Amino acid sequence: MKSNDSCESLIEKYYRAIFLYCLQLLGQDIVAAEDCTQDVFETLLEKKNSLDFDQNMRGWLYATADRICKDFRKKETKRIELVGSIDEIGEIPDLNVLDDSTAVFDSLSNEEIRLLKEYYSEKYGERMNLAKKYGMTQSQLTMKIHAIRKKLAKSI
């Protein structure tokens, strides 16, 4: 019970400060800062039973925010590089126009088709849940989608 109360107290006390810290680290990208701040407090809640709340939790929160923001920037850099290489492939057909019977999809497995449809029907912020559904990280999901797109492009 103490850890739940401590977590709530820390969230109330430090949420804004951690958000502003993430915002600064991520070059004023509000959406990224919100995501990273959420990740910091999700990590706190996941680890609440193993944390010593009598120690410097403020320092722990900032160190966690720092690590999460650094990881985000690394992933973002890789994503930008990957998107740049994907742009060289050319135009990918609109998946909403094509149905499963279209010959373009013959090169894909049913799982790949389902994954593409779910990926592009999800809002950007909901893709983390999709990644979890398929037992992947969000980065792995993005890389899988790009590989499928590349495979599609070759079949066109």
Image: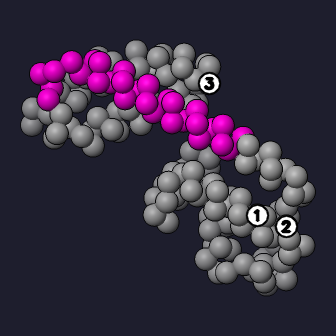
| Residue 30 quadrant | top right
Question: Which residue is denoted by mark 2 in the rendering?
Answer: 153
Question: Which residue is denoted by mark 3 in the rendering?
Answer: 29
- Mark 3–mark 1 distance (CA, rounded to whole Å): 28 Å
| Residue 133 appears anywhere in the view | no
Q: What type is the residue that disc 1 sits on? A: Arg
- Mark 2–mark 3 distance (CA, rounded to whole Å): 32 Å
Could you tell me which residue is drawn at 41 percent across and 20 percent down?
18
Q: What stretch of residues is rendered in magenta?
A: 52-80
Badge 1 vs badge 2, beta-carbon distance below 8 Å: yes
> Looking at the picture, does residue 86 appear above or below residue 72?
below
> Looking at the picture, does residue 152 appear above or below residue 66?
below
Could you tell me which residue is drawn at 54 percent across and 35 percent down?
72
Label disc, if present, on residue 89 of the rendered structure: none
Horizontal relation, residue 34 to residue 142: left or right: left
**Which dot, 3 or 1, sits closer to the camera?**
1
Looking at the rendered structure, the secondary structure element under dot 3 is loop
- How packed mark 1 is, by other alpha carbons closer than 10 Å (few <14, some 14-19, many 20 or more), is many
Q: Earlier in the sequence, mark 2 or mark 3?
A: 3
> Looking at the picture, does residue 98 appear above or below residue 54?
below
Q: Quadrant of the N terminus?
A: top left
- Mark 1–mark 2 distance (CA, rounded to whole Å): 6 Å
Q: Position of residue 86 (x, y in %)?
A: 80, 53
Question: Which residue is denoted by mark 1 in the rendering?
Answer: 149
Horizontal relation, residue 95 to residue 39: left or right: right
